[in-house]
Image (tube, helix red, strand yellow):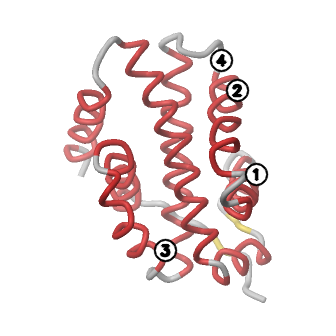
Amino acid sequence: MADALHVVVDGEHVRRSFGMLTSFILAPDMMPSLLGDFAGEPVEERLCLLASSRTIWHIFAQDAATVGAYPSFDDALAQTRDQADADYAAVLPGAVSMARALDEALALRGSSQLPPTLVDQIGADPAAGMGALGYYLRAASLALCACAVARRCEVGTLLSAVGQRLALAT
């Protein structure tokens, strides 16, 4: 069994996750190669990318609530989670379980320690890890689309603005 893992997400993880989100929305035909790259990463890197994708989902859920697309942040998370569950549960139930377990493990404020059993599970099952990544990207895309509608802008325009900010943040 692996030791507990301290997850450290850096700017590169966020940029990679945002790039995958952009591909997920605008160029879904590129996703198989991106998922293949993800599966080839060491487990520590996969966990950081999963954590950063989860963070992006939460950021867009918060923004969607702020601009009035949802009544609250908790409602935004619940509704996007419910839709991602519905989209993935029948086809990839292991992905839903893994995404939920990682979300719960990171939900404690300031927590970056993942339990050894979760580290082992993600290391042993790359397919479920890829599914969990897809789950987070789906949930983030739902929140992002709600933001775009509430802001009355195109999804691509919003992605471009966020991507530009990420590029300037380096």
Q: Disc 1 or 2, which lies upstream in sequence?
A: 2
Residue at the image point whose x is 53% and y is 10% from the top: 68
Residue at the disc numbered 1: 104
Identity, as a three-letter code, of the amino acid under mark 2: Asp
Could you tell me how far apart the alpha carbons at marks 4 and 1 are, in whole angstroms?
Answer: 19 Å
Q: Which residue is mark 2?
A: 74
Tell me: residue 5, above or below residue 113.
Answer: below
Name the amino acid type tagged 3. Answer: Glu
Tell which circle, 3 or 2, labels the residue nearer the N-terminal end.
Answer: 3
Query: Going 55% across and 77% down the picture, which residue do you hit?
Result: 44
Q: Give above or below for 71 relative to 107.
A: above
Whether residues under marks 2 and 4 lie with C-beta atoms below 8 angstroms apart, the answer is yes
In the rendered structure, find residue 72 and report the number of the disc placed on it: 4
Task: Say the numbered circle drawn on residue 134.
Answer: none
Give the farthest residue toward the front: 90
Question: Distance of mark 2 from mark 4, alpha carbons?
Answer: 5 Å
Quarter of the view holding residue 32: bottom left
Q: Residue furthest bottom?
A: 1
Which residue is at 72% across, 51% downward?
89
Residue assigned mark 3: 45
Mark with earlier residue (4, 3): 3
Residue type marked 4: Ser
